[in-house]
Image (spheres, rainbow, N blue to C red):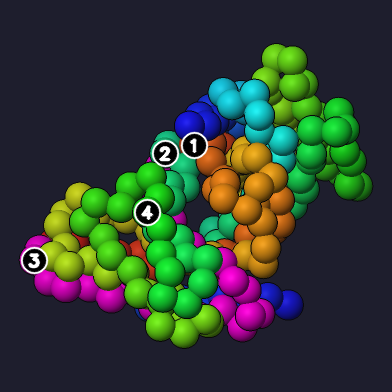
Amino acid sequence: DVKVTQSSRYLVKRTGEKVFLECVQDMDHENMFWYRQDPGLGLRLIYFSYDVKMKEKGDIPEGYSVSREKKERFSLILESASTNQTSMYLCASREGGSGNTIYFGEGSWLTVV
Amino acid sequence: GENVEQHPSTLSVQEGDSAVIKCTYSDSASNYFPWYKQELGKGPQLIIDIRSNVGEKKDQRIAVTLNKTAKHFSLHITETQPEDSAVYFCAASRINAGNMLTFGGGTRLMVKP
C-alpha cells in the first residue's frame, strides 16, 4: 500500500513563527502536492513538485514556500505564520499524469495564535 | 481555469436509503472525474472515478454518472450504511501531465442508524 506520512498531526504556533510541515512518501512517486483544506472550500492546491528540486505554484501559494531535496520528501514552509493560515494541511503524492490516483496523508492541523 | 461546484454541502439520510451528491464543472475539456471519501481524522481516499468516454460506472453500492453536455456528474450510494458517513469530494481535470485536479467544496454525509 502507498503510504504518505505527515510527521506532525497537530501543531500550535505563534504569529510570526517559521513553520515546517514535513511529508514523506514510500512509493517512489514523481509528483508530490501540498493542499489546504478549509470547510466549504474543498481542497486547494498550494504547491506541487514533479521532480527533485522542482516546484510549481498552485492556486494559493502566497505566504508559503516548499522544498524537495529528496524524491520521497516534500516540505511546506510558512515563513512567518499568520492567523489566516490556521487550517488543515494535506500532503499527497501521485505517480505519472493527472489521470492517476492521488494518495493523501492524514493531514496536519495547524493553529496559529 | 476549472471551477467545480458541489451540492449539497451536508446530507443526512436514514440507513438503507440512497444518497446522491452532485457536481458541476466549468471546463468542457475536463475528462477525468474522481470521487474521494474522507473519514474523520484521515486523509481523502479515492473511491471511484470516471473518464469522459463513459457515461456511468458502478462499483458495488456506489456509482458515478457523467453528463458531458450539461457538464455535471453525480455520486450515487445505495443501501447506505453508518460507515458511509464521511466527507465526500468530487474533482475534475484534464488527463494531461500538466493539469492538476480541481476539487469541489465537499459534502458531509451522515447516515443515521
Q: Chain of mark 2?
A: A
Residue A38, given in percent of the width and then of the height, sits at 38, 46
Which disc number belongs to residue B105?
1
**Range drawn in magenta:** A12-39
Picture quadrant where residue B50 is located? top right
Picture quadrant where residue B42 is located? bottom right
Q: CA distance from mark 2 to mark 3?
A: 25 Å
Q: CA distance from mark 1 to mark 3?
A: 29 Å
Residue A35, given in percent of the width and then of the height, sits at 43, 56
Residue A44, given in percent of the width and then of the height, sits at 43, 47
Q: Chain of mark 4?
A: A
Q: Chain of mark 1?
A: B
Query: From this viewpoint, is residue B58 visible?
Result: yes
Which disc number belongs to residue A16?
3
Q: Tell which circle, 4 or 3, labels the residue nearer the N-terminal end.
A: 3
Q: Which residue is mark 4?
A: A57
Q: Which residue is mark 2?
A: A41
Q: Amino acid at mark 2?
A: Leu
Q: Secondary structure at mark 4?
A: strand
Q: Secondary structure at mark 2?
A: loop
Q: Is A22 a magenta residue? A: yes
Do residues under tags 4 and 2 come within 8 Å of each other at their CB atoms?
no
- What residue sits 66% from the left and 33% below the top? B30
Q: Is the residue at mark 4 from the same chain as the one at mark 3?
A: yes
Q: Amino acid at mark 3?
A: Gly
Q: Chain of mark 3?
A: A
Q: Secondary structure at mark 1?
A: loop
Q: Amino acid at mark 4?
A: Lys
